[in-house]
Image: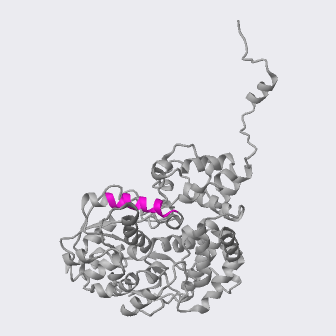
């Protein structure tokens, strides 16, 4: 059993609790134990806080990392935005004395210290990593394969980019997420400009919603072109943008897609036999029923 | 007949010899500040435009990341940081991965936003509201009644085991924000527009 401190972030626990519930339950079946990281805050959002004052971003993220250091556990998380904040701040503070000293000066006021003793992982990379779990183990955990469904993958931005500060290799046309989708019995599909951003990041969703939705709309057009039963990602913020965004696009641009958007953990939950009620799929803006009817 | 290039105008001669770019708005320290915050040597940009070419915001707005790179090098501080387009970057880092000079234009944008907020006392409203939410709840997107009910149905605790369920941690979060005077500044900037 591999144990990790489970960093929740904001959108997963406070908007899509199904992501949180399914992450815990599905990981348990893959021998990954997610322990609550008590007292964690927002990561803080890289677009919102890193943009206005990087020093605050470093200190706030370091505080969350310190909580896990006290537990003596590596952090696992399920959101690309959180990954950028927690992973990147962890690495930057480990390797840059000036940044670490700056953050520690602020943390000293609340009796905390960044030591740099843990690592940060996205749950999806743990699933893919054969040393921890691996695609085969995911495949073997599936009891209700999603046979006959066509699923569009969305990688999001901050897990893979900037590539030189990550360890995922190619960020122009990666294929590893497709392997994980295929392991659930579904057919992963390719579409134009797969790696494009969902449009929500950097505070753009709050600053200029039409601009953000226009980017999302382009992605949805590209996915519609090849025909997909659902879209899957591993970032609740992308999920929010695609899911609630489709309602907003219908209102603003008069275009409807009705494309169900599911977090990979929600899909994995379905494939491991969790019921839609256990995943709170009714909280999704876009109705997931057409997709569920195909697999249940 | 051999001759030297000469316009017979001493004033023009002096101007032509001077290869520096001058403008009354330029601040040479701006480039240094941008490079210090962004930790990328922005002046190495040779303006190829790969960044703008792959930018998801560029086709649908006047946001041009190459222009901001140029303005950093030229020291056009106020012009760059007070441009409303500055906040249209989704921070997708496509430009950073594709830059043939191995620069990080995204981080240059972030540095300019930092300067805009810290030095020019200016930021979009939604960013200030995020600060207020963070100060009040420790989450930028806090829990709500619908979500609490859904959590209970899923067998999760009503409040996630974050600062929501352990409010004693909120003081530490507020202390960090107070250290930089964030809450005060956010309140002030928001009250100015209302």
Q: Main secondary structure of the magenta part?
A: helix
Q: Position of residue A84 (x, y in %)?
A: 51, 70
Q: Quadrant of the C terminus of chain A?
A: bottom left
Q: Quadrant of residue B129?
A: bottom right
Q: Which residues are magenta?
A: A208-221
Q: Position of residue B57 (x, y in %)?
A: 48, 55
- Left or right of A143? Residue A245 is right
The vertical placement of B91 against B99, above or below, is: below
Nearer to us in this view, A278 or A63: A278
Residue A104 visible, this orientation: no
Residue depicted at x 73% and y 15%: B4
Nearer to us in this view, B64 or B35: B64
Q: Quadrant of residue A295?
A: bottom left
Residue depicted at x 70% and y 57%: B33
- Left or right of A152? Residue B33 is right
Nearer to us in this view, A71 or A192: A192
Residue depicted at x 40% and y 58%: A196
Does the segment drawn in magenta span residue A211? yes
Does the segment drawn in magenta span residue A227? no
Q: Position of residue A182 (x, y in %)?
A: 25, 70
């Amino acid at each position: 059993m591999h144990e990790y401190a489970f960093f929740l972030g904001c959108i997963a626990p406070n908007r899509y609790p199904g992501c949180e519930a399914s992450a815990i339950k599905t990981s348990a079946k893959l021998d990954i134990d997610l322990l609550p990281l008590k007292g964690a805050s927002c990561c803080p959002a890289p677009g919102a806080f890193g943009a206005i004052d990087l020093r605050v971003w470093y200190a706030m993220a370091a505080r969350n990392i310190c909580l896990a250091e006290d537990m003596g556990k590596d952090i696992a998380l399920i959101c690309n935005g959180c990954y950028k904040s927690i992973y990147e701040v962890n690495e930057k503070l480990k390797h840059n004395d000036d940044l670490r000293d700056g953050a520690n000066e602020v943390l000293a006021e609340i009796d905390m210290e960044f030591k740099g003793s843990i690592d940060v992982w996205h749950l999806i990379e743990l699933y893919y990593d054969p040393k921890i779990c691996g695609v085969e183990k995911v495949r073997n955990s599936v009891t209700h394969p999603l046979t006959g469904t066509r699923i569009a993958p969305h990688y999001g931005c901050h897990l893979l980019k900037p590539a030189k500060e990550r360890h995922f290799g190619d960020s122009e046309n990666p294929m590893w997420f497709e392997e994980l989708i295929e392991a659930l019995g579904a057919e992963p599909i390719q579409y134009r400009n797969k790696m494009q951003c969902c449009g929500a990041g950097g505070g753009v969703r709050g600053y200029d919603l039409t601009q953000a939705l226009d980017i999302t709309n382009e992605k949805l057009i590209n996915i519609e072109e090849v025909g997909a039963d659902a879209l899957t990602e591993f970032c609740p913020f992308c999920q929010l943008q695609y899911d609630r965004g489709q309602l907003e696009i219908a209102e603003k641009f008069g275009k409807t897609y009705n494309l169900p958007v599911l977090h990979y953990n929600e899909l994995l939950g379905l494939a491991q036999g969790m019921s839609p009620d256990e995943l709170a799929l009714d909280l999704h803006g876009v109705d997931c029923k057409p997709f569920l009817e195909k697999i249940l | 007949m051999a001759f030297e290039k000469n316009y017979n105008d001493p004033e023009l001669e002096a101007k032509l010899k001077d290869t520096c770019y001058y403008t009354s708005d330029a601040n040479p320290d701006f480039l240094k500040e941008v490079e210090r915050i962004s930790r990328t040597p922005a002046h190495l940009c040779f303006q190829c435009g790969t960044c703008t070419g792959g930018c998801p915001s560029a086709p649908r707005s006047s946001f041009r990341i190459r222009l901001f790179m140029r303005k950093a090098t030229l020291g056009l501080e106020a012009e760059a940081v007070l441009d409303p387009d500055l906040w249209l970057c989704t921070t997708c880092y496509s430009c950073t991965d594709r830059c043939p000079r191995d620069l990080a234009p995204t981080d240059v944008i972030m540095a300019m936003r930092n300067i805009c907020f810290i030095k020019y006392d200016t930021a979009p409203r939604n960013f200030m509201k995020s600060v207020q939410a963070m100060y009040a709840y420790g989450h930028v997107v806090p829990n709500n009644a619908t979500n609490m009910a859904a959590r209970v149905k899923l067998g999760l605790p009503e409040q996630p085991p974050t600062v929501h369920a352990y409010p004693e941690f909120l003081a530490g979060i507020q202390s960090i924000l107070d250290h930089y005077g964030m809450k005060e500044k956010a309140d002030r900037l928001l009250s100015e527009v209302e």
